[in-house]
């Protein structure tokens, strides 16, 4: 993804939190750029889509990551059942 979304990656370095997901965190430089008109919201959506696609490709190759994702889904289902049943 290096270079493809260099504008977003550069902006992301200015976010307050290193693990900023650009989804409502305080002082998110990417969201500020969208609000000010410097960055098209569709570009951020395309960036997120590519991140998801790359994650799923990596998931197919990495057995440890697959096991971790199964554990996350299991915890989520368990929490959902606890609060919704």
Image: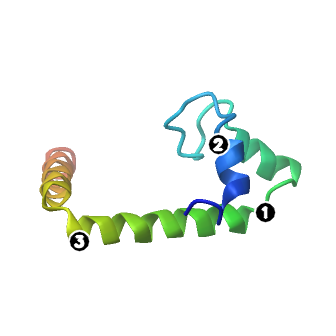
Name the residue at 21% across, 45% down: 83
Name the secondary structure under disc 1: loop
Q: Residue at x 37, y 63 (%)?
A: 55
User: Along the line of sight, which residue is nearer the eye, 9 or 34?
Assistant: 9
50 displayed left or right of 27: left
Which residue is rendered at x = 62% and y = 28% of the image? 16
Mark 3 surroundings within 10 Å by alpha-carbon count, few (fewer than 14), some (14 through 19), many (20 or more):
few
Picture layout, residue 69 above or below residue 29:
below
Q: Is residue 7 depicted above or below 47 in this figure?
A: above
10 to the left or right of 2: right
Could you say which quadrant of the image residue 48 lies in?
bottom right
Q: Which residue is mark 1?
A: 40
Percent position (x, y) of residue 46? 61, 69
Within 10 angstroms of label 2, few (less than 14), some, or many (20 or more) residues? many
Secondary structure type for disc 3: helix
Tell me the distance, in whole angstroms, between the alpha carbons under discs 1 and 3: 31 Å
Q: Earlier in the sequence, mark 1 or mark 2?
A: 2
Q: How is the image coloured?
A: rainbow
**Residue 17 location in percent, x, y?**
56, 30
Provide residue 60's location: percent of width, then percent of height: 23, 71
**Residue at horizontal 77%, vertical 42%?**
32
- For disc 3, the marked residue is 60
Q: CA distance from mark 2 to mark 3?
A: 27 Å
User: What is the spatial separation of the Cα atoms under label 1 and label 2, in whole angstroms?
Assistant: 15 Å
Q: Residue furthest right?
A: 37
Badge number at residue 4: none
Q: Is residue 39 above or below residue 18?
A: below
Residue 66: percent from left, percent from top: 17, 61
Task: Name the residue beneath numbered marker 2.
Answer: 12
For marks 2 and 3, the one nearer the N-term is 2
State the SS at label 2: helix
* Residue 5, quarter of picture: bottom right
């Amino acid at each position: 993804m290096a270079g493809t979304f260099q504008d977003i990656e550069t902006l992301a370095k200015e976010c307050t939190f290193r693990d900023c997901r650009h989804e409502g965190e305080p002082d998110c430089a990417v969201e500020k750029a969208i609000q000010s008109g410097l960055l098209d919201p569709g570009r951020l959506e395309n960036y997120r889509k590519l991140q998801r696609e790359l994650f799923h490709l990596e998931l197919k190759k990495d057995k440890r990551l697959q096991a971790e994702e199964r554990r996350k889904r299991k915890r989520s289902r368990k929490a959902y059942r606890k609060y919704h049943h």
